[in-house]
């Protein structure tokens, strides 16, 4: 099966299984989404969602975050992976946003200039907060793109390029979330019975 044909069929199945794609990280606005996505690195969304209500009650704007000292931020997010580094980045990021004028802007260069914000995090904010087409690649997406033969799994940057070329631009935002949900619920990395998987059973590369 050609890659374009495979991508169309995968898209059809994902739309059938996940007609709605709620954002898994709880947030209030673009700024709090940015904070939540930063916290989610090497941490489950479930754990992030347990921590952010307290964090957002204390600091749901850049101004309030910058007013906290790093130790206070760390005490709130201490159960999150890499908490000391993330606490420092959260405070510095808040200061940078204030220096820029106080708001989170839908601008790639601006977002990627912020402390602790890489291309994937910027992509999630662009897509989910502002509706700008992006295809952020997390571990689930990188793994499944290779498993399904949509990319070779060599580099995340290549996976992103390959997926953008495989799927129409107006589907990127929902495909990003659909593949994440599919990876979590149907397609684990280990001990996966591909013969029973609605996609791997026919799309997996040998």
Image: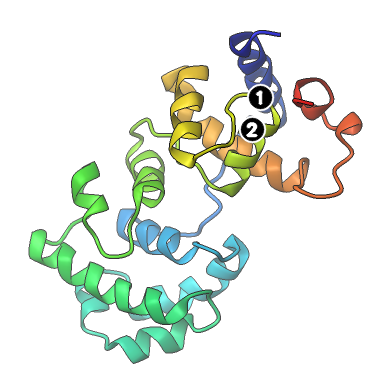
Colouring chosen for the image of the structure = rainbow
Q: Residue at x 75, y 22 (%)?
A: 203
Task: Name the element at disc 2.
Answer: helix
Q: Which residue is mark 2?
A: 146
Instruction: Please state if 184 lies on the left or on the right of 29 as rendered.
Output: right
Q: Which residue is mark 1?
A: 149
Q: Residue at x 55, y 81 (%)?
A: 79
Q: Residue at x 68, y 15 (%)?
A: 9
Q: Quadrant of residue 56?
A: bottom left
Rendering coords of residue 37 (x, y %) = 44, 58
Mark 1 neighbour class, 10 Å CA radius: few under 14, some 14 to 19, many 20 or more: some
Instruction: Please state if 193 lies on the left or on the right of 96 as rendered.
Output: right
Rendering coords of residue 66 (x, y %) = 21, 78
Instruction: Please state if 131 lies on the left or on the right of 206 as rendered.
Output: left
Instruction: Please state if 95 lies on the left or on the right of 120 as rendered.
Output: left
Q: Quadrant of the N terminus?
A: top right
Q: Identify whether 154 is placed above or below 120.
A: above
Mark 2 vs 1: CB contact within 8 A: yes
Q: In this orientation, does residue 106 appear?
A: no
Q: Residue at x 50, y 41 (%)?
A: 137
Rendering coords of residue 167 (x, y %) = 51, 19
Farthest-out residue, front:
154
The foreground one among 128 and 57 is 128
Q: CA distance from mark 2 to mark 1?
A: 5 Å
Q: In this orientation, does residue 99 appear?
A: yes
């Amino acid at each position: 099966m050609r890659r374009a044909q495979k991508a169309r069929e995968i898209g059809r199945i994902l739309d059938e299984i996940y007609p709605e794609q709620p954002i898994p990280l709880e947030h209030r606005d673009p700024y709090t989404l940015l904070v939540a996505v930063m916290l989610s690195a090497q941490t489950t969304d479930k754990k992030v969602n347990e921590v952010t209500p307290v964090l957002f009650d204390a600091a749901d704007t850049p101004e309030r975050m910058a007013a906290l000292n790093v130790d206070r931020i760390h005490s709130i997010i201490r159960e999150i992976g890499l908490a000391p580094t993330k606490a420092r980045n959260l405070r510095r990021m808040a200061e940078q946003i204030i220096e820029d004028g106080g708001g989170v802007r839908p601008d790639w260069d601006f977002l990627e200039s912020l402390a602790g914000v890489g291309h994937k995090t910027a992509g999630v904010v662009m897509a989910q907060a502002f509706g700008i087409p992006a295809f952020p690649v997390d571990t689930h997406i990188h793994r499944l793109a290779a498993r399904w033969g949509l990319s070779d799994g060599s580099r995340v940057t290549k996976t992103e390029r390959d997926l953008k070329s495989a799927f129409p631009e107006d589907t990127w935002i929902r495909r990003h979330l659909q593949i994440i949900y599919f990876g979590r619920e149907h397609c684990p990395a280990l001990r996966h019975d591909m013969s029973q998987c609605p996609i791997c059973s026919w799309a997996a590369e040998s």
